[in-house]
Image (cartoon, rainbow, N blue to C red):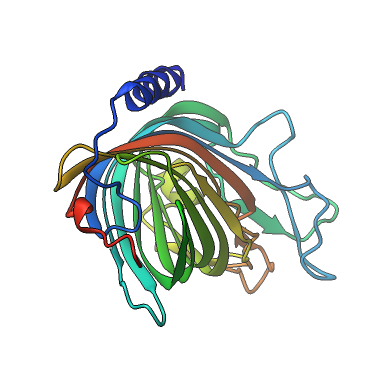
Amino acid sequence: MKYIVNLSGVVSLVLFLLPSAGSGSTLGQSYFLFGFNESSYDYSESAPPHTYEISPTYYYFTPPPSIPDREYGATSAFHAEGKFYSHDRALPWYGGFLFEYGGGIQTYNGTALDSIQVGVPGPGDTTQYFPPIVESKSNTFTRIGGFIGPYFKVGNTLVGLNAGLLYYNWYRGAGAYNESYSWVYLPVGAEVQWEMNDRLSVGLDMQYRIMLSGSMTATYDYATVLEGVPTAANNFTLGTRDGFYLGFPMQLQIDRWFGLEWKPWFELRPSGISGLTDVNPETGSGYLEPNSYSYSIGVSISAMFGTFSSFDRTH
């Protein structure tokens, strides 16, 4: 996080000290963008121990409150984006796409099995608590998305409204216990850009992300981790919980075809509790994935390619 803050300060200073030239700003211009994200990722799971009732019969059990279940660390990613602005006088519209892939070695602080064991409480209950561990895990993140919507330009301000689809995958790798989370969202958003001068524009990018579906596949279980017995993967259907994204892009035109973008951003991504899976028909016990909560704070730096000075300011 300290690296991100220092880098943000340097880039901000460079952007605002660069002199203005009369070549036309990036506001309302179509472009392709390639760059890198540096961010801090923080994930945690939550469930009240021994108390959550699944049905009149089934309850789930979590480790004692003294054992956390958290994952955090730095993430680096490559991204490619594109935006296209029509200049139709009757109905100006714009659209875009996003591809992002990256990861990092992050700290996992939790239990040897972070899916929760479910059972029937009663005398002689032998619910297994898994030992706490603190270790590094190799994680990868993938995002693919697209959007479309109308935009309006008034003076030095451009306002866009958009909606689309976003696919998000998180692969948690740690040897015998690997998990792959997948979510599909309907992002509904708004963008505002202000032309500061002929070369520089600043903006605000907001998205409310409606979760359409969520799933998790765990390629481990009790027998695999503690006894070394290969078993089938557990598949979980996650409860839907909506997320949020906020970005602050700054775009600087260097010449007719080339520019730079610097964007600090914040993302909130919660996920709901799953239903039971791998249920034992004799005991009614099984596994579920608890509620989770994650957020990321980062900055992206990108190269922009377009024909920025060709914008017709009469539109």
Q: Is residue 251 visible?
A: no
Front position in the image: 5 or 237: 5
Image location (x, y in percent) of residue 294: 57, 44
Residue under the image location 22 percent in, 41 percent down: 259
Q: Is residue 53 left or right of residue 161?
A: right
The picture quadrant where one finds residue 119 is: bottom right
Q: Is residue 246 left or right of residue 219?
A: right
Residue under the image location 61 percent in, 46 percent down: 293
Image location (x, y in percent) of residue 19: 28, 26
Image location (x, y in percent) of residue 200: 35, 38
Image location (x, y in percent) of residue 106: 41, 31
The picture quadrant where one finds residue 306 is: bottom left
Residue under the image location 45 percent in, 17 percent down: 2
Front position in the image: 273 or 75: 75
Quarter in which the C terminus is drawn:
bottom left
Front position in the image: 309 or 59: 309
Q: Is residue 8 visible?
A: yes
Residue under the image location 63 percent in, 61 percent down: 241
